[in-house]
């Protein structure tokens, strides 16, 4: 072949960047005959066109109209009438006043009724919980096999149950016998229990 190394390198470089150029223009005069016998390099393929959006998506609305507005503030909490608890709760306990309610819809279904709750070292924690287990007659495995009639457990080992309204508990919510029966019959697994300070 009559190409010089310099002309060949330049031809490769020019083709790589998509520029059409004659190799003969850069070749030495002795290489002219060989260059005229070689076929011209193929032109580079055109760049693909940008994809077009379907007509249903294309819009002529101004950019400001397409801007996403910030989310609105969440609605304020809704409390059940006559209680310190939200309407999402089915049972409500207010520790500071030793009271409990059953809630239906936006108001009181039953109560307020007197309660006692956890003593020092066994405080009943505030928060929102769900009823887990019910037992018509439960016996404590932690406190001398003490009877816990009409137990409705809502926070691990903490339950509503019939108990003393004069003596504080180990965390449970003591109700009168009559009130414990109403709570036992009204509450079901998954019902929300809200405990406020």
Image: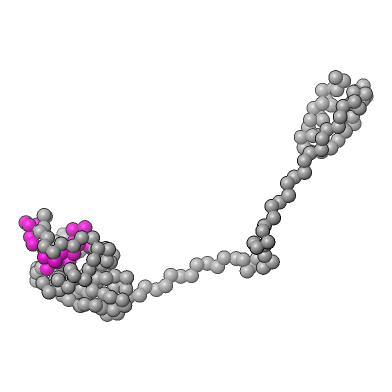
Judge whether 38 appears above or below 95 on screen. above
Looking at the image, can residue 72 be seen?
Answer: yes
Tell me where residue 43 appears, x and y as whole percent.
82, 38
* Residue depicted at x 20% and y 73%: 100
Q: Quadrant of residue 82?
A: bottom left
Tell me where residue 22 appears, x and y as whole percent.
88, 33
Looking at the image, can residue 196 be seen?
Answer: no
Q: Quadrant of residue 87?
A: bottom left
How many marks overall?
0
Residue 146 belongs to the span the image colors magenta: yes
Query: What secondary structure is the magenta-colored segment mainly?
Result: strand
Judge whether 12 appears above or below 67 on screen. above
Query: Does 138 sit left or right of 188 as displayed?
Result: left
Tell me where residue 75 appears, x and y as whole percent.
42, 72
Say how the picture is coloured: one colour
* Residue depicted at x 63% and y 68%: 64
* Residue depicted at x 11% and y 62%: 137
Judge whether 46 appears above or below 157 on screen. above
* Residue depicted at x 93% and y 23%: 33
Quarter of the N terminus within the rendering:
top right
Residue 160 belongs to the span the image colors magenta: yes
Q: Quadrant of residue 147?
A: bottom left
**Towards the viewer: 158 or 126:** 158
Span colored in magenta: 143-162
Residue that protrudes farthest toward the top in the picture: 1
Quarter of the C terminus within the rendering:
bottom left
Query: Does 84 sit left or right of 15 as displayed?
Result: left
Judge whether 41 appears above or below 129 on screen. above
Tell me where residue 67 appears, x and y as whole percent.
60, 65
């Amino acid at each position: 072949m009559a190409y010089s190394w310099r002309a060949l390198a330049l031809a490769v470089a020019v083709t790589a960047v998509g520029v059409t150029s004659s190799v003969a223009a850069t070749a030495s005069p002795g290489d002219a005959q060989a260059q005229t016998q070689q076929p011209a390099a193929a032109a580079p393929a055109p760049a693909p066109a940008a994809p077009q959006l379907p007509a249903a998506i294309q819009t002529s609305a101004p950019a400001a109209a397409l801007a996403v507005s910030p989310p609105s503030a969440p609605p304020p909490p809704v409390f059940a009438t006559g209680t310190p608890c939200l309407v999402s709760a089915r049972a409500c306990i207010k520790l500071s006043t030793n009271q409990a309610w059953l809630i239906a819809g936006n108001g009181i279904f039953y109560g307020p009724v007197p309660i006692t709750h956890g003593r020092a070292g066994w405080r009943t924690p505030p928060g929102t919980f769900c009823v887990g287990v019910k037992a018509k007659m439960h016996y404590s495995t932690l406190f001398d096999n003490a009877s816990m009639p009409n137990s409705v457990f809502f926070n691990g080992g903490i339950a509503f149950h019939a108990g003393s309204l004069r003596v504080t508990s180990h965390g449970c919510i003591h109700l009168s016998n009559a009130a414990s029966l109403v709570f036992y019959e009204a509450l079901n697994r998954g019902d929300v229990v809200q405990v406020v300070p």
